[in-house]
Image (cartoon, rainbow, N blue to C red):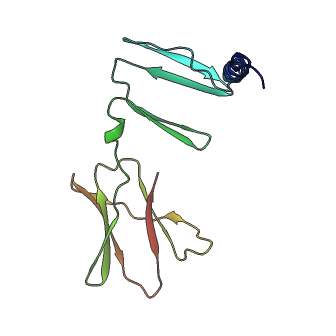
Amino acid sequence: MKPEWIRRGKFYLGIVCGLAVTWVLSTRAQYNLSQYVIADGGGQASGGGWTLNATLGEPAVGTATGGGFVLNAGFWSSQMQSPPTLTIMRTNSNVVLSWPSTAVGFTLQQTPTLVAASWGPVNMVPTDDGVTKRVTVPITNSQSFYRLTR
């Protein structure tokens, strides 16, 4: 049987080797956020084909999109605007589609079917009373589906 100090030595050597391998692999990480600012201003960090322009200490609020990703940045990002609700209500021989006036940049679209949907704009200018945007569409014998999109 081997002495206790040899068994412990192998155990500790294994831990040290494992930590060394972990450290080497972590230094070869694909992304590197090596720049930061703790004050006014900002910085840019790049790595692995990605670039992050960031600020800390000032209200830099906004949305950046690209490559299928969206970055909502700023102190108030948790309070960002949720997608607007499209409300549909029947009135006599019409359907009234409405959404909040604060939903800037959204377009009302329609399609006759959801199978291989071909969305197109609703060619009507919405009325806007400052609170709600509305479009009144006559009821027909054909079905239509509606959505708001940017």
Across and down, in percent, residue 37 comes to 44, 12
Q: Is residue 144 left or right of residue 6?
A: left
Could you tell me which residue is drawn at 41 percent across and 13 percent down?
41
Across and down, in percent, residue 83 comes to 38, 53
Could you tell me which residue is drawn at 28 percent across and 52 percent down?
101
Quadrant including the N terminus: top right
Q: Is residue 27 left or right of residue 103?
A: right
Q: Nearer the viewer, residue 43 or 103?
A: 43
Q: Is residue 94 above or below residue 72?
A: below
Q: Quadrant of residue 79?
A: top left
How many labels were placed on the picture?
0
Question: Which residue occupies the extreme bottom position in the image?
Answer: 141
Q: Is residue 59 above or below residue 123?
A: above
Question: Which residue occupies the extreme right position in the image?
Answer: 1
Could you tell me which residue is drawn at 36 percent across and 60 percent down?
125
Q: Nearer the viewer, residue 69 or 26?
A: 26
Q: Quadrant of residue 27?
A: top right
Q: Is residue 60 left or right of residue 49?
A: left
Across and down, in percent, residue 40 comes to 37, 12
Across and down, in percent, residue 139 comes to 37, 82
Could you tell me which residue is drawn at 68 percent across and 20 percent down?
8
Q: Nearer the viewer, residue 26 or 30?
A: 26
